[in-house]
Amino acid sequence: MSRVFNFSAGPAVLPEAVLRQAAEEMLDWHGCGMSVMEMSHRGKEYMAIHDEALADFRELLAIPDNYQVLFMQGGAIGENAIIPLNLIGRTGSADYVITGTWSVKSEKEARKYGKTNIAVDTSTGGFLDVPPMAEWRLSAAPSYVFTCTNETIVGVEYPFEPDLGRIGRGDVPVVADMSSHILSRPIDVSKYGLIFGGAQKNIGPAGLTFVIVRDDLIGHALPACPTAFDYQLVADNDSMYNTPPTYSIYVAGLVFKWLKAQGGVAAIERQNIAKARLLYDCIDASGLYENRVAKACRSRMNVPFFLRDEALNQAFLDEAKAAGLVQLKGHKTVGGMRASIYNAMSMEGVAALVDFMKDFERRHG
Ligand SMILES: *Cc1c(COP(=O)(O)O)cnc(C)c1O
């Protein structure tokens, strides 16, 4: 068996130790004679797995007591509808900060449920930066301000936390799509009203969606909100109103344990900074590769880059694959290449990529 270095944007690489443990426990979890997949979600074995995953997630992000953690389904794209269904009824409108492909999608979806105001739109600049909050054109009474703090496709990450208190609008809750950088760096949860994302980038298998939501934002769902997606009901039932994605939650729980063993989010951030620096330095020092994102806003998780000679794209991908470096093709809307280097991607993997890129440039540049 040989494992490749997998730079997929998602579903993405998982820690090998986690996969091994899941494999060992596949047929018989802790002596109970069955797989986690086969357990009733109401049984004491699964309930223990569920509660421990929730507790570890809370601990890793230091989530304050006045926030609920919900394990849901439907992905981040599902939440693009579920969030306005639950929150927009408070004033009937919401503000959207558009900094890339994902926030574009979120705003389009929200229009079905209320009025949206575009507070920022960097599309004309090609989605290369995040304007400071002083430049955001917020409306008078939005139910929330929507942000996507790491734009997975264009590789733009906020260089600041969107703390509206700093521009005198601390009364407005910030919603943040953190699908692709949750747990990659410490955050101050108390600065947000709601944080959400799909698990399949930096947490675990697809199928699990996490929502961290402040208590006072729960209980305002529009009448049309599907029952299974009403935050009040989900919270009141400890994320078990309907059957949760039990196996995904189990694996996520193993990832949380792995992350704690690495030293937690602050320790993994140091690794992420070092990994990203190695790759961006290689790109910046090269005559062949190029990244166009404003330096301060470059994502530590998703690194898009272009070959100045696009005719070399296929050779790059083929030779990378032969060297055991896979899933490097950029998103179809952007082109070029993209290396996603989530928590579970080792420094060794990034170093192997950088060595390959330098060698490729020597041979073809
Ligand atoms: C991957 C991703 C999504 C889409 O998530 P799904 O789970 O496919 O719905 C949304 N937002 C961001 C920032 C993402 O990275």
Image (cartoon, helix red, strand yellow):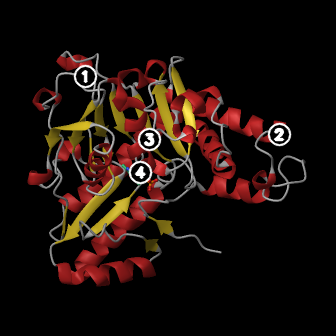
Q: Position of residue 198 (x, y in %)?
A: 48, 48
Residue drawn at (70%, 58%), measured in percent from left and top?
A: 20
Three-letter amino acid code of the residue under disc 4: Ile
Give the residue pinned by disc 3: 82
Reading the chain from its start, which is encountered first: label 2 or label 4?
Answer: 2
Is any atom of residue 71 visible in this view?
yes
Residue found 48% across the figure and 66% down from its top: 5
80, above or below 286, in the image: above
Q: Residue 64's x, y, as percent?
A: 50, 19
Whether label 4 touches label 1, CB < 8 Å: no
Distance (Cα) linking label 3 and label 4: 9 Å
Mark closest to the chain's N terminus, 3 or 1: 3
Viewport quadrant of the N terminus: bottom right
Residue 187 visible in the picture: no
Disc 4 Cβ-to-ligand 1 distance below 8 Å? yes
Q: Residue at x 21, y 46 (%)?
A: 99
On screen, 309 above or below 257?
A: below
**Distance from the alpha carbon under mark 2 to that under mark 4:** 30 Å
Mark 4 Cα-neighbour bin, 10 Å: few <14, some 14–19, many ≥20: some
Q: Which residue is mark 1?
A: 164
| Mark 3 element type | helix
| SS for dot 4 | helix
Tell me the kind of residue under disc 3. Answer: Ile
Does the CB distance between marks 2 and 4 fall below 8 Å?
no
